[in-house]
Image: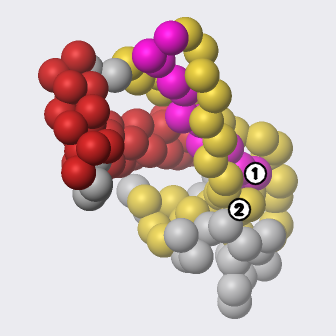
Amino acid sequence: MSALSSKALILTTLEGVPGKEIVEHYGLVQGSTIRAKHIGKDILAGFKNIVGGELKGYTELLQEARKESVERMVRQAQQLGANAVVNVRFATSSVAPGAAELFAYGTAVKVR
């Protein structure tokens, strides 16, 4: 995610945006979502564990969770007046049996 633009807001895992100057710093912004596993996908995943291969149901679940958490982080940054989020990171945690949180966070800034 090196300098990807989302809804006119720049997202980057770097500490700054190449070719741009940070002119304002708004602080930490974050977005999260909690997703539960699906029993049908669990059964299919159990079969895949025996024969091997990608667990596509879980891949899709994680992609959706990443997208939603990033969208929430972007919304928070835009509300602050930021036009970029630098140092974007992801974290996960287990919140209940069969449910996990995906957390996106970064530093909201204004660049020019």
Structural distance between the alpha carbons of marks 1 and 2: 5 Å
Outermost top residue = 96
Residue underneath mark 2: 86
Inspect the magenta stretch and tell me whether residue 14 lies in it. Answer: no
Callout 2 amino acid: Val
Q: For the stretch drawn in magenta, what is the main secondary structure?
A: strand
The residue depicted at 61 percent of the width and 36 percent of the height is 92
The percent coordinates of residue 11 (x first, y second) are 57, 63
- Proximity of marks 1 and 2: CB atoms separated by less than 8 Å: yes
Of 75 and 55, which appears nearest the observer?
A: 55
Residue 13, placed above or below residue 49 = below
Q: Is residue 104 magenta?
A: yes
Mark identifier at residue 14: none
Position above or below: 63 against 93:
below
- The residue at the point 53 percent across, 70 percent down is 1
At x 31%, y 43%, the residue is: 49
Report which quarter residue 24 is drawn in: bottom right
Helix, strand or loop status at disc 1: strand
Q: Amino acid at mark 1?
A: Thr
Regarding residue 33, the answer to whether it shows in the image is yes
Q: Which residues are magenta?
A: 97-108
> How packed is label 2: few (under 14 Cα within 10 Å), some, or many (20 or more)?
many
* Horizontal side of residue 104 vs 99, given as left or right: right
Residue 110 seen from this side: no
User: 10 Å neighbourhood of mark 1: few (<14), some, or many (≥20)?
Assistant: many
Of marks 1 and 2, which one's residue comes earlier in the chain?
Answer: 2
The residue depicted at 23 percent of the width and 17 percent of the height is 39
- In-image side of 27 versus 59 (left or right): right
Number of marks present in the image shown: 2
Relative to 102, residue 94 above or below? above
The label shown at residue 107 is 1
